[in-house]
Image: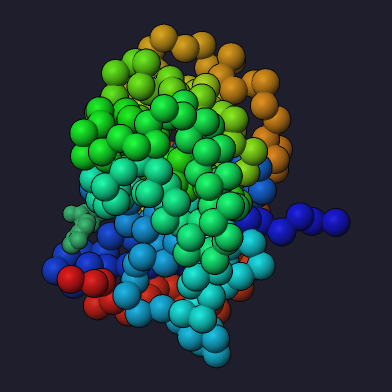
Amino acid sequence: MTVAALIDVRRLGFRYTDGPPALTDITFRVEPGETVAILGPSGAGKSTLLLHINGLLPSRLPTEHSDEATITVGDLPLTSANLNAVREKVGLLFQNPDDQLFCPTVARDVAFGPLNLGLSPEMVTARVERALAEVGLESFADRDTMRLSMGERKRACLAGLLACHPDCLVLDEPFSNLDPRGRQQIASIVRRFSGTTLLATHDLDLVGDLCDRVLVLDSGILCADGETRTILSNQSLMEKHGLSVPTCRDPATMNTEKPSASSPNVTYNSDSGSEDRLPILDHNLPDDPAVPLSRPPDGAPA
Ligand code: ADP
């Protein structure tokens, strides 16, 4: 029996009101338990894609009766009616923690999500304590969120997500602006998370350590999708998309301990319009070519 994908994105297109397409015809699936990296140069569309997955973009969502539903999380199509339920499944970490933290103390910030889930005060307290322990901030409950280091702020944000018991973490540049210890602290949290993780990053060494699979996005187009070691060791592919091959890792040792949930067979797509034959998972090919290609181009919020 085929296990349902946790995240299923089909033929997603998006354009901000004042620019060229930020995403064009993006189709991919993420299986339960997978850890998948999205790589690509700045401006490739990584953040835009992640914002779609928990419904922050576009401002106009498809309705129950529309055939435009291009994102499914678990068994829920991302529609206006399902928005809150999808957000309970997907915990989104913003690139800048200052966009995420807004309560005066760490404990109150972490409690915000569980309180919104309608949990009892006792349950909220238990979840906050556990989440703070999971990110190594047990003694930070009463600290001012605005007086934390960047690493502490990122971990406080992650505690807020974990306290809601999400099925999926969607992380936008979780390792940026951190020193080596801070990067490893975040990596350790990602490694211990038993759900599904989708993360955008430029940190190729940590991608090699953590991720089963890599998607390469460039100019809003999904250019490659394959096993981590296959993608990261493909020098011409990486350089073509503004990336470099990690220098301090032997690709043969990359993330070999954790089996991929999907154990994908890599096939090659010669229809990409590129001179390269880029690895694309066969299950990513759209089942129904009649599905509309793009969302309306003017759907972006101000
Ligand atoms: P990445 O995360 O890969 O750096 P983004 O998703 O941030 O890429 O950006 C993709 C494209 O969309 C870029 O051309 C960027 O300039 C544009 N863009 C991003 N956010 C906005 C916005 N709020 N309004 C208009 N254009 C935007």
Q: How is the image coloured?
A: rainbow
Q: Position of residue 96 (x, y in %)?
A: 26, 43
Asked whether, in this view, residue 282 is left or right of residue 93, the answer is: right
Q: Residue at x 47, y 48 (%)?
A: 161
Identify the image quadrant of the N terminus. bottom right
Q: Say which of 147 and 219 sits in front.
A: 147
Asked whether, in this view, residue 165 is left or right of residue 45, the answer is: right
Q: How many marks?
A: 0
Question: In which quarter of the view is residue 14 placed?
Answer: bottom left
Question: In which quarter of the view is residue 259 placed?
Answer: top right
The residue at the far left in this view is 18
Q: Say which of 259 and 174 sits in front.
A: 174
Q: Is residue 35 above or below residue 249?
A: below
Q: Position of residue 284 (x, y in %)?
A: 59, 55
The residue at the far bottom in this view is 65
Q: Residue at x 48, y 35 (%)?
A: 132
Q: Position of residue 225 (x, y in %)?
A: 52, 43
Q: Could you tell me if residue 272 is visible in this image?
A: no
Q: Quadrant of ligand 1?
A: bottom left
Q: Residue at x 25, y 72 (%)?
A: 300
Q: Say which of 158 and 131 sits in front.
A: 131
Q: Say which of 83 and 241 sits in front.
A: 83
Asked whether, in this view, residue 182 is left or right of residue 267, the answer is: left
Q: Position of residue 100 (x, y in %)?
A: 30, 50
Q: Could you tell me if residue 142 is visible in this image?
A: yes
Question: In which quarter of the view is residue 174 placed?
Answer: top left
Q: Residue at x 40, y 62 (%)?
A: 52
The residue at the far right in this view is 1
Q: Is residue 104 above or below residue 148?
A: below
Identify the image quadrant of the C terminus. bottom left
